[in-house]
Image: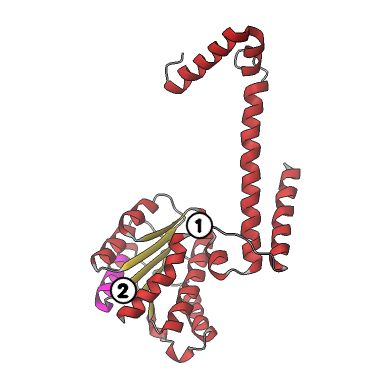
């Protein structure tokens, strides 16, 4: 186990160093993240604002990732002259979100367009937040909705109303219990590990990109080892009655037929 951990660490470090030295790292296209530019462009063309929700959680890994996506979205919107409204549920996230939005406008040289009132605390109650957000979307007639972060029972309330408004919606959540609701009501959805790959994918920062590629290589190695272990245990196990190789060698052609028949009965549920 120690050797495996050291090997994985070595792969990640090597990938990071290669990326920092200019080596191009391949990251497959993630439609949900690629759609952010399209969604911002749509709002710009329509002359209507963008709404962004970083979820209901407090300061956590999931929320910080959502704020990183918020920063990227605001930079993109600022360069195109689009307005971004941020609705928050947790008061501890408010100052972080305010600073992220302010820095994003400054980074693209559009600090004069920054409107502090567009980063809003809605409510710390789950369903009051959902209803307040729905009212905000309707009053502002938003063209695009972004939902990234931790969402729960209110997710469908938010996205159904956004769909009714005709807004283009992009959502991302690492919670598998909420992903089906987003898929049913949003145009693009970022699922599973794609959510945590967002910062590296959007910024292409070498350290983040190298780390992401190194982790993917390590996962591939672990999967290969698991498959190899299953194969070895199946072919060379200690239990002769379940050892495929022993059955084949002991019974010859009859053993082959018996073994194949056993696999068919097992996978069709007729064994026993």
Q: Pick whichever of labels 1 and 2 is earlier in the sequence.
A: 2
Q: Quadrant of residue 167?
A: bottom left
Q: In which quadrant of the rendered view does residue 231 lie?
A: top right
The quarter in which the N terminus is drawn is top right
Q: Secondary structure at mark 2?
A: loop
Q: How many marks?
A: 2
In the image, residue 45 lies at what x, y percent? 33, 79
Vertical placement of residue 239 versus 1, above or below: above
Q: Give above or below for 236 relative to 254.
A: below
Structural crowding at the residue carrying mark 2, measured as other residues with C-alpha within 10 Å and reported as few (<14), some (14–19) or many (≥20): many
For image coordinates 46% across by 83% down, the residue present is: 79
Q: Which residue is mark 1?
A: 194
Label drawn at residue 112: none
Horizontal side of residue 224 vs 64, given as left or right: right
SS of the residue at dot 1?
Answer: helix
Do tag 1 and tag 2 residues touch (Cβ < 8 Å)? no
Is residue 157 shown in magenta? Answer: no
Q: Nearer the viewer, residue 143 or 129?
A: 143
Answer left or right for 170 relative to 225: left
Residue behind mark 2: 143
Query: Is residue 21 positioned above or below 140 on the image?
Result: above
Taking the image as shown, residue 186 lies to the left or right of residue 211, namely left
Res 49 visible: no
Q: Picture coordinates of residue 74 (x, y %)? A: 45, 77
| Magenta span | 130-140
Residue drawn at point x = 63 percent, y = 36 percent:
226
**Relative image position of residue 83 (x, y in whole percent):** 38, 81
User: Which residue appears at 61% of the width and 18% of the height?
Assistant: 244
**In the rendering, at what x and y percent does residue 225 appear?**
66, 38
């Amino acid at each position: 186990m120690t050797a495996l951990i050291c090997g994985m660490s070595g792969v990640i470090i090597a990938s990071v160093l290669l990326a920092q030295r200019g080596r191009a790292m391949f990251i497959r296209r993630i439609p949900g993240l690629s759609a952010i530019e399209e969604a911002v462009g749509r709002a710009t063309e329509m002359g209507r604002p963008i709404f962004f929700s970083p979820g209901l959680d407090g300061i956590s890994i999931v929320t910080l990732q959502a704020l990183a996506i918020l920063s990227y979205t605001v930079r993109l919107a600022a360069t195109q002259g689009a307005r971004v409204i941020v609705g928050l549920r947790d008061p501890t996230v408010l100052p972080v979100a305010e600073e992220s939005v302010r820095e994003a406008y400054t980074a693209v040289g559009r600090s004069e367009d920054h409107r502090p009132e567009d980063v809003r605390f809605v409510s710390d109650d789950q369903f009051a937040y959902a209803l307040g957000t729905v009212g905000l979307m309707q009053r502002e007639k938003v063209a695009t909705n972004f939902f990234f972060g931790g969402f729960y029972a209110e997710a469908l309330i938010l996205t159904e109303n956004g769909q009714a408004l005709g807004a283009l919606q992009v959502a991302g959540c690492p919670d598998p219990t909420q992903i089906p609701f987003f898929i049913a009501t949003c145009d693009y959805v970022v699922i599973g590990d794609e959510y945590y790959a967002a910062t590296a994918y959007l910024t292409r920062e070498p350290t983040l990109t190298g780390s992401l590629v190194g982790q993917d290589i390590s996962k591939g190695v672990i999967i290969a080892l698991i498959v190899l272990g299953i194969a070895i245990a199946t072919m060379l196990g200690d239990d002769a009655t379940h050892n495929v190789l022993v059955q084949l060698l002991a019974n010859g052609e009859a053993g082959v037929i018996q073994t194949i028949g056993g696999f068919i009965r097992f996978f069709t549920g007729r064994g026993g």
